[in-house]
Every structure is written in C-alpha cells, then in structure tokens.
Image: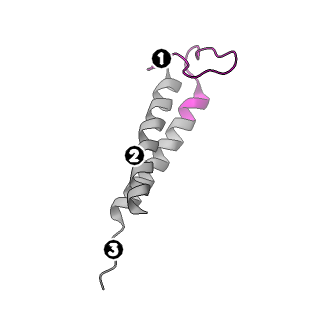
C-alpha cells in the first residue's frame, strides 16, 4: 500500500504541475484524444491553475505520508 501511495502521489504532483502551468499560460498543448469539438485553451485559466495547485498539494501530502510511514517493529 505504501508503494501505491507513493506512486499515486508522484503522478498527482506531475499532473497537477502540468495543469497548473497550463492554467497559468506557461505551457501550451494541443488537445489529445478528443471525442467532441475540442479546442485548445485560449490563454490562462484560473480554474485549471487552481485545480492543478490543489492536485499538486494533495500529491505532495500523499508522497510525504508514504515516505514518513514506518513499518512497526516487532
């Protein structure tokens, strides 16, 4: 369980960082795997910046939690 939490936390940090940078307008990417009329985000988006920041913080907390947890000694 500790390994799963660590991997999920690292992925959340990376994905949250991408969303944060896209929301701030620093990174621009074309839509991938569009199923409808998808258009690229035009300019900064505070919604994606906030979502990315929250996901990054959750990922940092999960990573810290997985690293700080110790196995009980018998």
- Foreground label between 3 and 1: 3
> Which mark, by number, is residue 28?
1
How far apart are the alpha carbons under marks 2 and 3? 21 Å
Range of residues picked out in magenta: 26-50
Does residue 44 belong to the magenta stretch? yes
How far apart are the alpha carbons under marks 3 and 1? 43 Å
Q: On the image, which quarter does residue 43 sit in?
A: top right
Q: Nearer the N terminus, badge 2 or badge 3?
A: 2
**Mark 2 Cα-neighbour bin, 10 Å: few <14, some 14–19, many ≥20:** some
Position in image of residue 5 (x %, y %): 43, 56
Position in image of residue 49 (x %, y %): 54, 31
Position in image of residue 16 (x %, y %): 48, 37
Q: Nearer the N terminus, badge 2 or badge 1?
A: 2
Q: Is residue 20 left or right of residue 7?
A: right
Q: Quadrant of the C terminus?
A: bottom left
Q: Which residue is mark 2?
A: 10
Q: Which residue is mark 3?
A: 71
Position in image of residue 58 (x %, y %): 49, 49
Q: Residue furthest left?
A: 73
**Mark 1 Cα-neighbour bin, 10 Å: few <14, some 14–19, many ≥20:** some
């Amino acid at each position: 369980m500790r390994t799963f939490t660590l991997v999920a936390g690292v992925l959340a940090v990376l994905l949250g960082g991408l969303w944060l940078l896209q929301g701030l307008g620093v990174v621009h990417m074309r839509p991938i795997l569009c199923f409808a009329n998808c258009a690229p985000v035009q300019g900064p988006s505070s919604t994606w910046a906030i979502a990315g920041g929250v996901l990054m913080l959750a990922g940092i907390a999960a990573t810290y939690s997985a690293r700080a947890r110790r196995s009980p000694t018998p």
